[in-house]
Amino acid sequence: MAMPIPSPIYREIPYPEEALALFRREGAAPRFPWRPPSPPSPVRLVEHAPPSAGPVFFLGDVHGDLLALLGVLAAIRSLAPGGGRIVFLGDVVDRGTDSLACLQRISSCLSDPLFPVTFLLGDHEEALSWEREGGRLRSSVSHANFAEESMGLPGVRKWGPALVEWLQGQPRALFLPQGLFAAHGGVPQQDLLPLLNSPQSLELPQVQQDFLWNRLTDARRKRPGRFGRGTEFGRENLREFCQAAGGFLEERPRLLLCGHQHPFPGWQWIVADEAEGMAALCLATTFQRVPVPGESPWGVPCFARYLPPAPGERATGKDLAVFGMRPPGGGAEGPAEAGRACP
């Protein structure tokens, strides 16, 4: 039987000064690193990561907030000078005003051997398409300001199609050792469980839709609503998926890392089955928060760190930590330097 997973340790850390200096310089020289692959690489809908000797970091929704992204990346390097895996949980674009700069920064991280990167597709990235006739980016979701703003950016007709192709080639779900797994939205709902009988079944279109669009709630159970792309899942839904996937994966999934929900202040911890150690951690890595009347528009960017157990030891979850980043030069009213990143 798996060991119970205790609630993650939470620590607040200051915003790195070197990241603030970099934020002020960012954007002076536009970079468009995406090139159409030749021949096109196969799309990896589900990725299975090998064991990692170093820490694994998870970033939630960034949503065009370059200030938060640069700060978290600098903090990760400080916490793990020897390197570690970085997993982006999707929705890097839209809402904020620096979506392109955030994508460029993540692209520049892909060549760093010390910090291998997995970029999981979010619904805001999946919704992007290239309109050849009009020569512009289109989006099928709301709050899609990146597609509109890109119309005035230099060279968009060259890098726009390559960006869409690169994004659509990124995985939708990631399964790691010790029962960790990650997706932007959540897990396949109960009506899809009978379809799950092999690793390949995780790549079915309707299963992929739930990985991207399903939304975590602290409810016992949610029935699947198939009237649109999104639905909700509760604690029992998470437990039932983990049990079903454990029948054909080498390790039973136990701990889900996800985004999509925009929790406040920046993370939410939900236990699905204490005895089996099944739980979910939802993250938001942005100073912005979904507007709530009468409340502050500023949140706390949060990211998670998982330290794999030493060889021969069992994973207990005691090495799972969440870090919240205090705003640079700002108080409760929000980050003083974030005017460009947070509308």
Image: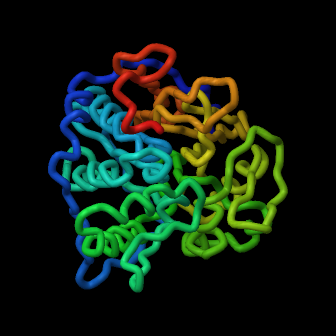
222 or 163: nearer the viewer: 163
Q: Is residue 339 above or below residue 327?
A: below
- Residue 101 coordinates in the image, percent (x, y): 30, 50
Give left or right: position of 229 versus 320: right
Question: Residue at coordinates 44% horizontally, 35% vertically from top-left?
Answer: 306
Residue that appears at 47% across and 52% down: 94
Residue at the front extreme of this rendering: 152
Q: Residue 135's quadrant in the figure?
A: bottom left
Q: Is residue 71 left or right of residue 182?
A: left
In terms of image quadrants, where is residue 275?
top right
For the N terminus, the quadrant is top right
**Left or right: where 230 falls relative to 65:** right
- The structure residue drawn at horizontal position 25% and vertical position 74%, both measured from the top left corner, is 158
Q: In this rendering, does residue 232 appear at all?
A: yes
Of 101 and 268, nearer the camera is: 101
- Of residues 77 and 104, the one drawn nearer to the viewer in this rendering: 104
User: Picture coordinates of residue 278 (x, y %)?
Assistant: 66, 41
Q: Residue furthest top?
A: 331
Q: Quadrant of residue 313?
A: top left
**On screen, 174 above or below 44?**
above
Image coordinates for residue 256, horizontal then vertical, percent:
58, 46
* Numbered label tally: 0
Residue at the image point whose x is 48% and y is 50% from the top: 89
Q: Can residue 309 be seen here?
A: no
> What kind of colouring is applied to the model shown?
rainbow
Closer to us: 113 or 64: 64
Is residue 221 positioned above or below 283 on the image? below
- Where is residue 97 shown, x and y percent of the image? 40, 46
